[in-house]
Image (tube, helix red, strand yellow):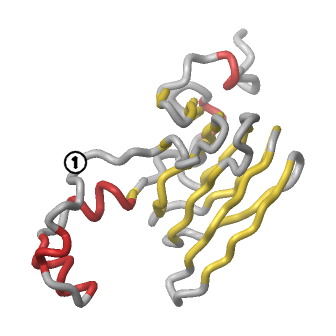
């Protein structure tokens, strides 16, 4: 009988590999005991950043396995919290709260396990979200001339994990 209570998330090829890091997904498809839940094993390269995003259908609990993580959370009420945590520490993000994670270390990588309260957490990223709107809509929302947004790079997909600026 196969062991249904054991899954080597660190042993699978990450489904996402970018210049900023990697992400391997554990879900009910690969680990049936996760029914209703999901976990990502995230490797952030030095200065790697997870794009600002929200999960409207899932809370998120992050556990730092190695290295450091700086996280910023923006609540729907406009409050912003930024903090840095290290190995063995956790932080929690409520569903619908905009947030991002970054590796503040410019030399060493870090590893984070992100646990979600939904087996298919939705990901709405800033890059894909802003790219979906016309310059006129963005101008109206940000009270700017629509031409202000003419040079905004338009990408139809989210970046997810990017390289830091420095």
In the image as oriented, which residue stretches furthest toward the front? 166
Which residue occupies 70% across, 42% down? 106
Image coordinates for residue 144, horizontal then vertical, percent: 21, 86
With 148 as the anchor, is 163 left or right in this view? Answer: right
Q: How many marks?
A: 1
Image coordinates for residue 2, horizontal then vertical, percent: 70, 11
Which quadrant holds residue 152?
bottom left
* 162 up-or-down from 121: above or below: above
Which quadrant holds residue 33?
top right
Q: Which residue position holds label 1? A: 156
* 97 up-or-down from 13: above or below: below
Considering the image in quadrants, where does the N terminus appear? top right
Question: Crowdedness of circle 1 by 10 Å Cα count: few (<14), some, many (20+)?
Answer: few
Image coordinates for residue 149, horizontal then vertical, percent: 19, 70
In the image as oriented, which residue stretches furthest toward the right? 88
Q: Nearer the viewer, residue 146 or 131?
A: 146
Which residue occupies 70% across, 23% down? 10
Identify the secondary structure beneath mark 1. loop
Image coordinates for residue 100, horizontal then vertical, percent: 56, 59
With 156 as the anchor, is 21 left or right in this view? Answer: right
């Amino acid at each position: 009988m196969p062991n249904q209570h054991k899954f080597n998330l660190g042993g699978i090829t990450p489904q996402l590999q970018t210049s900023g890091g990697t992400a391997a997904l554990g879900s009910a498809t690969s680990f049936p005991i996760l029914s209703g839940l999901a976990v990502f094993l995230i490797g952030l390269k030095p200065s790697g950043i997870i794009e600002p995003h929200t999960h409207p259908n899932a809370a998120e609990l992050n556990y730092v396995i190695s290295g450091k993580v700086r996280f910023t959370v923006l609540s729907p009420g406009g409050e912003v919290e930024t903090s840095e945590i290290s190995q063995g520490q956790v932080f929690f993000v409520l569903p619908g709260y905009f947030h991002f994670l970054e590796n503040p270390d410019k030399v060493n990588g870090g590893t984070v396990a992100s646990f979600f309260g939904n087996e298919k957490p939705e990901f709405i990223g800033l890059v894909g979200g802003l790219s979906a709107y016309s310059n006129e809509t963005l101008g109206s929302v940000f009270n700017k001339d629509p031409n202000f947004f003419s040079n905004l790079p338009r990408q139809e997909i989210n970046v997810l994990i990017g390289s830091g600026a420095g």
